């Protein structure tokens, strides 16, 4: 603490600040261990392939991780996989396959999506079903200390007694008296209080189950995150993240379990805003999912990452094609400058440091939008320098642009994106499609509509669908 009562970051003079959901204030980041940052992120429930809302969360926390790394921290990221839950079991039943086949298939889809969107792999990615012993231990501690109990109806459920934990509701800013039931499904008859939540669910016929001192059953979602974060990051760790939809009940329940068991638990709570469509959360259950393969036919993966990362991580993104294409065009202005700069000056290496203004924006609760404004200012100056033939200036600006983009995982020249297989290819196709579209326009101008349609059909046969929009024609790949 310093004189005015504010905590100060320990790395040099850097003051890294985050909005902490628990205190509802922006707080200086002081890590538990100097030079290290431990981060737990609630990852996927693998009942279906990911939509862009899930990946927004992954991208936002990847940006956080990268910025911590840029600031010199050694980051340990634990991102869990919920590989057993009601929806996975239901999907397995309806497809007539084992539950683990659903989990495996969708976990691979998530991994692939995180990878192609440029998210660094987590340090560890534990799965719930691999951590039943840790969960049993945690339940035993909580039962022994009077925070949890075995259901009174012989169901084998284990509940957390929310009245035993005075801080219950502090994260989500609610008072216990105002809360209604925890909304657990059909097995809540053994609860002492409707607000108690299930940590463990007793076995039901035809469902997978594991042995415990309280009978066979399966993990509840909240319990797994408490057990796995402690196992990999310790009883107290730096940052816990997830989407805003998880604040209550999931994160509230994690706190009750972990602190009830005597752990310090997370010191900072960061939540990404939701990605919505027409104001409604994008959700597997609402049927409004935009899946990744569909999206990367519209724009390149790096452009999709730009779109998802550019808004402040705490803001809502209401999806629209228009905004996606605008983001792609904005990214192309940046990458176009880098390409032209490299043509003029030869290889452009990233500068060793990002400009101060960019760093200040990122330090201030990860303001990527302000950071990208600095990037665009550099690109504007860089384009002017290109026109003037000012080689040194072009080289300097391009190097800084690469450094800034690299810090948030968006440097198109980096090994990561250069190796992605599509680098530059979209621009090539873009140029070829433009030639064809100019011919189509010429045919239309001379009222030869048959020839114009023929060109569009030939493009479609080659897998390129053209759509006329008020801002001119756009194309996307349409395979199969
Ligand atoms: N629409 C969204 N926008 C932003 N983040 C999201 C969105 N949907 C889920 N997330 C986040 O993605 C991560 C993985 O989510 P999880 O698999 O638990 O999704 P979910 O909430 O069950 O999704 P769905 O509502 O689609 O079933 C969590 O951190 C969650 O908060
Ligand atoms: Zn969790």
Image (spheres, helix red, strand yellow):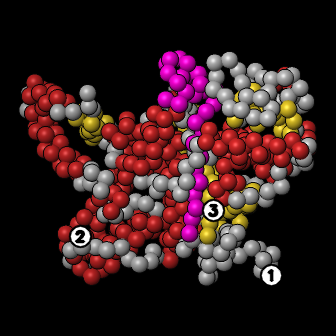
Residue named by callout 1: 3
Determine the image quadrant of residue 400: bottom left
Distance between the alpha carbons at the discs numbered 1 and 2? 49 Å
Q: Which mark is residue 342?
A: 2
Residue 74 in sight from this viewpoint: yes
Q: Position of residue 331 (x, y in %)?
A: 36, 56
The residue positioned 45% from the left and 48% from the top of the image is 114
Taking the magenta stretch, the answer to whether it contains residue 203 is no
Residue 252's place in the image compared with 200, above or below, is below
Q: Earlier in the sequence, mark 3 or mark 2?
A: 3
Instruction: Answer few, some or many: residues within 10 Å of disc 1's Cα (few below 14, many 20 plus, some between 14 and 19).
Output: few
The residue positioned 82% from the left and 51% from the top of the image is 261
- Mark nearest the camera among 3 and 2 is 3
Magenta-drawn segment: 74-101
Question: Circle 2 — which element?
Answer: helix
The residue positioned 71% from the left and 35% from the top of the image is 220
Q: Earlier in the sequence, mark 3 or mark 1?
A: 1
Residue named by callout 3: 38
Taking the magenta stretch, the answer to whether it contains residue 90 is yes
């Amino acid at each position: 603490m310093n004189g005015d009562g504010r905590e100060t970051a320990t790395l040099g003079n850097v003051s890294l600040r985050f909005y902490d959901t628990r205190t509802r204030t922006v707080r200086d980041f002081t890590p538990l261990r100097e030079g290290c940052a431990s981060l737990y992120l609630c990852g996927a429930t693998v009942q279906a392939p990911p939509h862009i809302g899930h990946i927004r969360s992954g991208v936002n926390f990847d940006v956080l991780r990268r910025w911590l790394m840029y600031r010199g921290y050694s980051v340990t990221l634990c991102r869990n996989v919920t590989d057993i839950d009601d929806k996975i079991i239901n999907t397995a039943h309806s497809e007539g396959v084992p539950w683990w086949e659903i989990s495996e298939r969708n976990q691979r889809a998530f991994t692939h999506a995180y990878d192609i969107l440029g998210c660094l792999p987590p340090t560890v990615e534990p799965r719930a079903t691999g951590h039943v012993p840790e969960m049993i231990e945690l339940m035993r501690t909580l039962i022994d200390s009077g925070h949890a109990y075995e259901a009174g109806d012989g169901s084998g459920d284990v509940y957390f007694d929310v009245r035993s934990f005075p801080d219950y509701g502090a994260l989500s800013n609610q008072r216990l008296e105002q809360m209604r039931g925890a909304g657990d499904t059909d097995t809540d008859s053994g609860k002492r209080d409707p607000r108690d939540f299930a940590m463990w669910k007793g076995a039901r016929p035809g469902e997978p189950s594991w042995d415990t001192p309280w009978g066979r059953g399966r993990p509840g979602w909240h319990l797994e995150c408490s057990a796995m974060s402690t196992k990999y990051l310790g009883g107290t760790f730096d940052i816990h993240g997830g989407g805003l939809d998880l604040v209550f009940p999931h994160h509230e329940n994690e706190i009750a379990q972990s602190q009830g068991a005597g752990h310090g638990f997370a010191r900072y709570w960061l939540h990404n805003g939701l990605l919505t469509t027409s104001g409604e959360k994008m959700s597997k259950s609402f049927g409004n999912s935009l899946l990744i393969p569909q999206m990367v036919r519209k724009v390149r993966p790096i452009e999709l990452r730009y779109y998802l990362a550019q808004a402040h991580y705490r803001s809502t993104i209401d999806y629209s094609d228009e905004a996606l294409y605008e983001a792609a065009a904005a990214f192309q202005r940046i990458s176009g400058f880098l390409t032209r700069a490299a043509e003029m000056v030869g290889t452009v290496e990233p500068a060793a440091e990002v400009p101060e203004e960019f760093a200040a924006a990122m330090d201030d609760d990860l303001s990527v939008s302000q950071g990208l404004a600095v990037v665009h200012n550099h690109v504007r100056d860089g384009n002017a320098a290109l026109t003037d033939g000012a080689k040194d200036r072009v080289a300097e600006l391009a190097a800084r642009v690469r450094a800034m983009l690299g810090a948030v995982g968006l440097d198109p020249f980096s090994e990561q994106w250069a190796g992605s297989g599509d680098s530059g290819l979209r621009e090539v196709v873009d140029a070829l499609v433009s030639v064809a579209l100019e011919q189509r326009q010429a045919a239309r101008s001379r009222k030869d509509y048959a020839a114009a349609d023929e060109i569009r059909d030939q493009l479609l046969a080659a897998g390129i669908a053209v759509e006329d929009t008020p801002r001119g024609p756009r194309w996307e790949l349409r395979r199969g």
